[in-house]
Image (cartoon, rainbow, N blue to C red):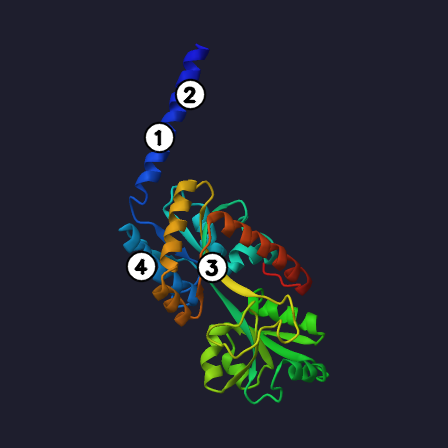
Amino acid sequence: MYRREVLKGAAATWGMSCLNVMAQGAWPAKPVRIVVLFGVGGASDTLTRLLGEKLQAYFNQSFPVENKTGAGGNIGMLNVMNSPPDGYAIASATIGTLSINQFLYANAGYDPAKDFAYVSTIWENCNVVVVSAEHPAKNMKEFIAWAKDQPKGVTFSSSGVGTTPHLAGELFAKRTGIQGVHVPFRSSATIEVVGRTVDFAIDNVASYVPLIRAGKARALAVTAAERWPTLPQVPTMAEVGLPDFVITSWGAFVMPAGTPPAITAQLSKAVQEILSQPAMKERFMTIGAKAVHSTPQETAAFAAAERVKWKEIVRWSGAKLD
């Protein structure tokens, strides 16, 4: 009797293994939905849709994009987390949902380290420190000196509490010793910066490149490790005397935990081949981001390293979203 049960169990296990192998070999056998965590028309949405079109051609299968917004991206992440781990649900996740939100929200509803299978990074961009073109400070040194002379402190804008522009502004104030006052808006406050309603911003580079080129805003530094391709004349934070001030926003593909590694590896390889194409790199940069890719292991390690950095920044900034 015992031997018969063991053999039945072994047969069942073997059968499931065969089914898994068959499923992996046939993937994708049906449309693979990609969940974008933010609204239509934003950078994350635009870049994801562009990549989705290329994945459709690569696999000869549909990769429809769904926008599931809310709670700083947490709604969409939960949707994918609760999907079957069969390779047919992808979250176009971001730095916020994979490395920041768990420290902002009392309960984000998911653990980014345990509840997802990582695939690849997709894109990255940086922030730029900007002031109005009418501001008296012509460079970073002059701006810091000016800011320290303001008895009531200086204001900086962001697109909301807990965003990288907000946390970058808090970090900048701490590192330079200025008194920074955060003023959140619903989106990038380009008009307020240009009109000097707020004193400065450390915001998405893509939002400000047109204003900088038009002479309406002045760029003091970028937060990338190297000079940014669309603003080659603007120094990095390290070059203006603020080392270890590298802040990039980024996106990555993740799938539900338990998704077969053969599928995540196959998708990661496809992303790498697509985003290595010069034409795709150019199209991404036109939108304002670098096309980047990584292995599933590298992606998970990168997100984990980012969590270490942002946990500390969120802690002393006091930022909370409940």
- Mark 3 Cα within 10 Å, few/some/many (few <14, many 20+)? many
Residue 25 is at least partly visible in this image: yes
The reply to whether callout 1 and callout 3 are in contact (CB within 8 Å) is no
Q: Is residue 261 left or right of residue 141?
A: left
Find disc 1 in the rendering and name its residue: 18
Find disc 3 in the rendering and name its residue: 251
Find disc 4 in the rendering and name its residue: 53
Find disc 2 in the rendering and name its residue: 9
- Mark 4 Cα within 10 Å, few/some/many (few <14, many 20+)? some
The reply to whether callout 2 and callout 3 are in contact (CB within 8 Å) is no
Amino acid type at mark 3: Gly
Residue located at (36% from left, 52% from top): 270
Q: CA distance from mark 4 to mark 3?
A: 17 Å
Give whichever of discs 2 and 3 has the lower sequence position.
2
Amino acid type at mark 4: Glu
Kind of element beneath mark 2: helix
- Mark 2 Cα within 10 Å, few/some/many (few <14, many 20+)? few
Q: Nearer the viewer, mark 2 or mark 4?
A: 4
Along the line of sight, the residue nearer the viewer: 286 or 99:
286
Along the line of sight, the residue nearer the viewer: 168 or 102:
168
Residue located at (37% from left, 34% from top): 20
**Relative to residue 51, is residue 23 depicted above or below?**
above
